[in-house]
Amino acid sequence: MTTPSDTPSTVAPTGRARPRLGGPRWLLGASLLLLLLLVMTQAAQVAGRVRLAQAGRPLAGALLLRQRTGDLPGGPGAPGIYALARTAGEGAGTAAVRRVEIDEKLRQAAAGLAGLAGGQRLEGVALGSLGQYASAMAALEAAGGAAADPFTALALGNVLDEEGRLDDARALWQPRRIERAQSLQLYRAGVALASQGQRDQAEALLLKAIEIDPTNANAYHALGGFYWGPDRAQSLAMYQAALAAGGLEPFFERLATGRVAFIEGRLEDAATALEEAVALQPDHSEAVVLLGTTFSRLGRLDEAIGFLQGAAERSPRAFWPLVELGRIYIDLGEYEQAVETLTAAAGRRADVAQTFELLAEAYQGAGQGPQAINAWQQAVTLSPNSAALQVRLGDALAEAGRVNEAIAAYRQALAINPNNGLAKQGLLVLGVEP
């Protein structure tokens, strides 16, 4: 016989099931607790992100101000990626008051980010931008260093480079190809600045591009063109390096090959390579002009004139085709045509002494002495430190009977170069002791 005490507690006297402990009410309570914990966790994460954003705001302001004012490593126009965690240094072109404002924002950011969860990378960028490299490296290492995201690796490498440890920086960047990205950015910025006439800064950025990535053939090629006029030996070295690095587009590879051959005096090889380059880009003025010049040196004057005339006609601003044409007409004894062509060249650019030197020779050949003297004087004005031009001016003045002016020109040549034999000879011919 069953007693009440033997009755299962989960069964009512009527036979219906009783509610279990931990049934729907317990589940509801547990769900509410879980929801509360989730909300609290997310709220903490959101609050952390808010604090991080607030602390990073001065850093963003400082970096934007650096970009806007040109207070960047390498100066205005340098790519922002290159400036990450680097100091701009002294006298980067920014007014002192702006430099103070930038530094104050960076210090504020570094202080606000110190000890903030997830803020080590930004703290490292702020400290690096202030030039506090040891502290910047510690913060960036705490953020994960090279194993972290690419921007941390980029900033850490920039700090290493700024400390003179470029090999360490490259070793850190290479797994992610960061050095290639930086070098390409610097190359593009350098080319843009060169096209704007900012040669010193352009040269610095292009040289830094190949320092960071010695395999950047495009940067070598750009420097080859940069040095083509003023320094043929340096131009040759850069074009050779570009060809050795490999990877140039076919046109630029042919142009570099042609220029190397031209400098080395292998004119037939130069003509072959340049003809191939012009076939790829018929409107590329530099390639066309050099091909015409090469044909001129080879005595293939009809071909040279055809290419150079075409280049001059295709562009109303083309200058060097006219200069080379003028040289050819002088060599042919067609002085009137040379005068006309070189006068047109001077009209396009009046800042190149070579144009007026050739124009003076053309005038002399045409028997127009006074015009020749004017052209020599203009050449001397543009290149006042050339003893050779002073001598040519003195010769023209002496021939015209303007003895005192000729003596002055010869003496100026000797002031520039005391060993100039032609100037001494000119003075002796005029009866004057050197």
Image (tube, rainbow, N blue to C red):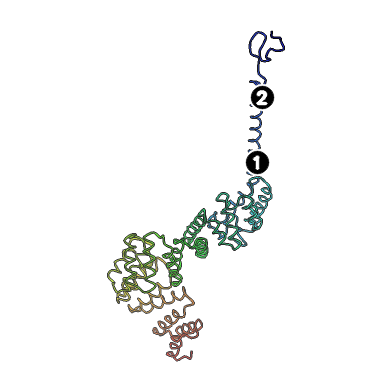
Q: Quadrant of the N terminus?
A: top right
Circle 2: element type: helix
Residue at figure coordinates x 55%, y 51% from the top left: 150
Q: Nearer the viewer, mark 2 or mark 1?
A: 2
Relative horizontal placement of residue 256, taking residue 65 as reference (left or right): left
Q: Is residue 396 visible?
A: yes
* Percent of width and height locating residue 110: 66, 51
Is residue 36 positioned above or below 376 on the image?
Answer: above
* Percent of width and height locating residue 5: 72, 12
Kindly identify the amino acid type of the residue bearing the numbered disc 1: Gly
Q: Residues within 10 Å of mark 2 (few under 14, many from 20)?
A: few
Q: Which mark is residue 310?
A: none
Kindly identify the amino acid type of the residue bearing the numbered disc 2: Gly
Circle 1: element type: helix
Separation of residues labelled 2 and 1 (CA atoms): 28 Å
Q: Nearer the viewer, residue 82 or 100?
A: 82
Q: Earlier in the sequence, mark 2 or mark 1?
A: 2
Q: Which mark is residue 48?
A: 1
Q: Nearer the viewer, residue 410 or 213?
A: 213
Q: Residues within 10 Å of mark 1 (few under 14, many from 20)?
A: some
Res. 304 image quadrant:
bottom left
Q: Is residue 340 visible?
A: no
Res. 4 image quadrant:
top right
Q: Nearer the viewer, residue 131 or 191?
A: 131
* Percent of width and height locating residue 82: 55, 56
Q: Which mark is residue 29?
A: 2
Residue located farthest toward the right when viewing the structure as drawn:
5
Residue located farthest toward the front when viewing the structure as drawn:
1
* Percent of width and height locating residue 401: 40, 85
